[in-house]
Image: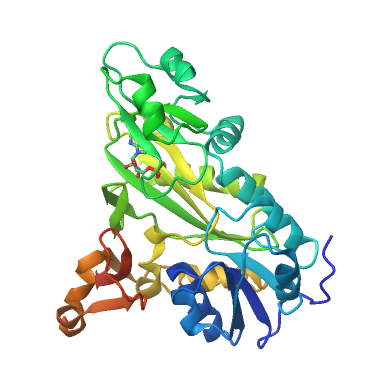
Amino acid sequence: MSTSSHTFPLKPGSTIGVLGSGQLGRMLAVAAARLGFKTSIYADAAGPAFDVAASTTVGAYDDWDKLTAFAGTVAVVTYEFENVADATARHLARLVPVRPGPKALAVAQDRLVEKTFLAGLGITVAPFVAVASAADLAAALPCGNQRAILKTRRLGYDGKGQFAIEPATDPAAAFSAIGGTAAVLERRVMFEREVSVLICRGADGQDVIYDMPENSHRDGILRRSVVPSRLPDDVICNAHAIARRIATALDYVGLLAVELFDLGEGVPAAGRLVVNEIAPRVHNSGHWTMDACATSQFENHMRAVAGWPLGSAERHSDAIMDNLIGADALEWPALAAEAGCCLHLYGKHEARAGRKMGHVNRLSKRV
Ligand code: AMP
């Protein structure tokens, strides 16, 4: 039960709290500012979001006094990363509305809970089994030449905490490679392409869904998203139904990303999509919405969190979004000079390898 005295829809001038100081928090804060909101960022270290926020707090995510003080200065709390600890979300939720709610976090931050939840909704996921030890893994390893992926239950992102299992893999070595921690073993899916659904759901249950991007990864990190995807309408319709089922079951408020594998044309529409994972936050595969849509994913997330009506997710242009990873960002003078290239830089000082430094959106006439 919240003790907050704020009423929704929040008035312009209200302060929205954000947990996390990365680029997603930064883009959320900029979008909120456009609507007249102030943003207060709470994070365990300063980051790019601090440069654009009205106020900032550096504090541990289990510093209950600091979190209580933070909650006292904001009308609502949202977050930019799914690994907010359950205890942190619940502490804040006793003081102020937390959107999306703690249930979405609990589901999305543990791969075993997530896959079990999705399967329970009748949604197809890669066949999986829980693995708590090297012996479990040895017993679960696929026979023949089937391939699988071992993933830590918690704290995996951008392909981290994963190990590809080949027919000759030694279970003890594989289990220790992911840190000897609780994991899930899932079958490797032979997909044709990766796509995602970006759905934004308001507090009143209304939603908008962006056109689905087709996503390519390298080394486990998203490199490029292209809209429109090559999916036929009936498969897109199924993807929307999957996303709505998840958002409704979580009583979700805000932007939810659902990452899917498309098994391709050879498979009937009803069985083509396999959900890989969900992210209870704005998502890298939705960055193109900043320039190609009437309302970006960041603005719609903040609208939902503030109890506002959602803006149109309509796409006015075709778009290709490329992440600028590490040294890619050093090309900024050429990108800034390129006609039609929408450049977004996150203000990170050091262009370390593998670090997301910015992205570019290139638009073309919608076909
Ligand atoms: P994740 O951290 O689960 O999003 O995985 C990162 C990337 O690894 C995905 O975007 C896929 O390209 C690949 N991947 C993850 N799980 C599987 C799977 N079961 N089968 C095939 N590829 C996968």
Quarter in which the C terminus is drawn: bottom left
Q: Position of residue 356 (x, y in %)?
A: 33, 64
Residue pictured at 56% horizontal, 41% vertical: 110
Q: Is residue 272 visible?
A: no
Residue 253 sits in which quadrant? bottom right
Task: Work out whether 105 lies above or below 143.
Answer: below
Q: Give whichever of 182, 5 is nearer the camera.
A: 182
Where residue 296 sits in the image (x, y, percent)? Answer: 45, 71
Q: Residue at x 58, y 59 (%)?
A: 207
Coordinates of residue 98 in the picture (x, y in percent)? 70, 63
- Residue at 28% x, 58% y is 354
> Which image quadrant for residue 352?
bottom left
Front-lying residue, 267 or 336: 336
Question: Residue 73's spot in the image, x, y percent?
Answer: 73, 80
Q: Residue at x 71, y 79 (%)?
A: 10
Determine the image quadrant of residue 18: bottom right
